[in-house]
Image (tube, helix red, strand yellow):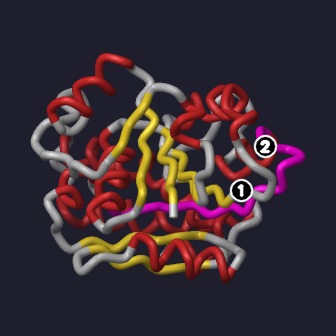
Amino acid sequence: MKIAVIGAGAWGTTLANTLAKQGHDTHLWVREEELCKEITETGYNSVFLPDFKLSPDLKCSSNPQDVMQGADYFLLVVPSQFMRSALADMKQYFPLNPAVICASKGIELNTGAPMSQVVYESLEGLNPGFGHLSGPTFAYELSAELPTSIVLGCEDEKLAAEVQDIFSTPYLRIYTNPDYRGVELGGAIKNIMAIAAGMADGLKFGHNTRAALITRGIAEMSRLGEAMGAQAATFT
């Protein structure tokens, strides 16, 4: 099967490389032509993932049509604030009923929309199947093949099982959850608690304060998630 990965930052490159190493026909869209040329010629993404040699089976292009035409799955990994404009530019290359998996964390600044809403609005009329891939993960550690788990939020059980099978490796385990809204919100708003925890560490408030902050943070995240249509249990 062909998998189109849209976005060649550290996370997009890592996911694309992981898929290519598993033998999937993986095509990576790289916005910068010079970077695309470098990846093709040297096997390295020196800008976003400089320490890892990429699979020789990973194909890349700066032409979205080349990457997306005939793809069975579309993995979106562009920055969240550019997701809507990227999808508008590329909508013509999506088929009807595309299997779309978003791996970008964030909430759109001007609208407050989570990525699922951005995807559904941007691909209106194409009836996309949607899933959201979220942490706890770091690109560097997954690239180093350290044991990693990740959550796929997806209402469609068949699509969730397919993506789970595609991504699974001896060092990467995929857990599925039908509450895609909770999964995508958890990945985005936990960063607020992470910033606060860093501030508390800088102020030398100690482990008690950090533990309280995280515990109450999860409670606040759960309440916000419920108000936005998610399930509170997902945030644990």
Q: Which residue is mark 1?
A: 98
Amino acid type of disc 2? Answer: Leu
Q: Which residue is mark 2?
A: 123
Q: Position of residue 120 (x, y in %)?
A: 78, 49
Secondary structure, mark 2, is loop
Nearest-to-viewer mark from 1 and 2: 1
Q: Position of residue 190 (x, y in %)?
A: 45, 55
Task: Please name whichever residue, 102 or 56, is drawn nearer the observer in this view of the structure.
Answer: 56
Amino acid type of disc 1? Answer: Pro
Q: CA distance from mark 1 to mark 2?
A: 9 Å
Reply above or below: 95 against 158.
above
**Residue range (magenta):** 122-137
- Which residue is at the far right? 125
Question: Pointers 1 and 2 in contact (CB under 8 A)?
Answer: yes
Q: Position of residue 154 (x, y in %)?
A: 64, 71
Instruction: Check residue 176 in the rendering and tell me which mark sits there, or answer none.
Output: none
